Image (tube, grey):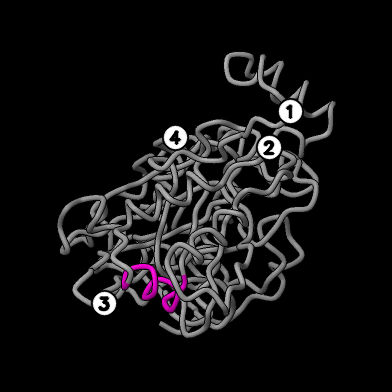
Amino acid sequence: MTLTPAASFTADEVGDGMPLFAPTRERVAHLLEFVPQSGETVIGEVPPANGTLTYSVAAANAAMTGCTPPEFWLVTEVLAAVLGGEFNLLSIQATTHPAGPVILVSGPVAAQLGVHGGSGCMGPGWPVNARVGRAVRLALMNVGGARPGGLDMATFGGPAKWSLCFSDQPVDVEANRWPTLAEEQTGSPDTSTVTVIGGEGPLNVNDHFSTRATGLLRMIAHTLATVGSNHAHNPRSTPMVVIGAEHAAVIAGDGFTRDDARAFIARHARIPLSQWSKEARDGRLRNRYPKLYGDADDQDEVAVVAPEDLVLAVAGGPGKHSVVIPSFGRSVSVREIRLPA
């Protein structure tokens, strides 16, 4: 099927500012042929407008980004994930915070569909990543009514409100193997998952000098422990850390398991109360969470994340970099996925 961009769509209130394809009946029907559900099957209601998202409506949005049928299926799985779990979609859609769905596809499905997790995986140049992420976002805007300047109250917005979709990779070095996130989540290397958090754009961790796991993980932890981040203000938040392949080889090579790495990051990602302004200490922390901080001294530390709440993956290409993706707060959903027969 040949798709021709329909430039007229860019000016309408159905797009994201980029060129779109016309969602013709033929294109929508072509996508629906791949999924076992009928077009009238409801995926859910999308806040804040609470519009009804059916497979046909999802297909129309996916058609506009040029998704192939298997990519459309993945879009529906991601949409089901953001409508479930603890993703907290209503808040993500309407907040002034720049959060959007950060989509991590893990397991065999990522390779089968061509979701990229290597060099530049969070940037341009990877059509599957872009098409899937954009289709999800279009559905959230067009069905949920969360358009910038309207029900979407984001002060600035950010990359995750456009398209931030990528895959991860395993680490196997010096007899220490880190599986993909999907294998860790399900216990099977043959099973795939999609993990979605409400997050910001990636914050780079530049460390060309640390040669041991403890040094690298400390740098990552201190990058995560930023006083202005939403996750620093909200206990049980779910930020994501994506360790670059070179950093991961060093950490795994020192014998650290993924759980070891999570625990180390959580233990060192702490901020003294004195780093907040007095108004923020009182209004955001002491008054809002009196059991935790009501009697705390200004030098007492705020734990930014609990080990079990930290989403930790490995991705990217060559280069001594990792990234921290700050979260909205508690916003995470994991869904096991399997390609239709």
Q: Residues within 10 Å of mark 3 (few under 14, many from 20)?
A: some
Compare residues 261 and 118 and report the one nearer the observer. 261
From the viewer's perspective, is 298 left or right of 333?
right
Label 1 to label 4: alpha-carbon separation = 32 Å
| Front-most of residues 252 and 58 | 252
Circle 2: is it few (<14), some (14-19), or many (20+) Cα within 10 Å? some
Q: Is residue 33 left or right of residue 141?
A: left
Q: Distance between the residues labelled 2 and 4?
A: 28 Å
Give the mark nearer the N terminus: 2 vs 4.
4
Q: Is residue 26 visible in this depiction of the protein?
A: no
Mark 2 or mark 3: name the one nearer the start of the chain: 3
- Residue at horizontal 73%, vertical 28%? 298
Point out the frontmost of discs 1 and 3.
1
| 15 displayed left or right of 261 | right
Do the residues bearing badges 2 and 4 touch, measured as CB atoms within 8 Å? Answer: no
Residue 148 picture location, percent across and down? 75, 49
Residue 272 image label: 2
Q: Which of marks 2 and 4 is in front?
A: 2
| Quadrant including the C terminus | bottom left
Residue at 66% from the left image edge and 74% from the top image edge: 19
> Which residues lie in the magenta part?
244-253
Q: Which mark is residue 298?
A: 1
Q: Distance between the residues labelled 1 and 3?
A: 43 Å
Q: What number is the disc on residue 173?
A: 3
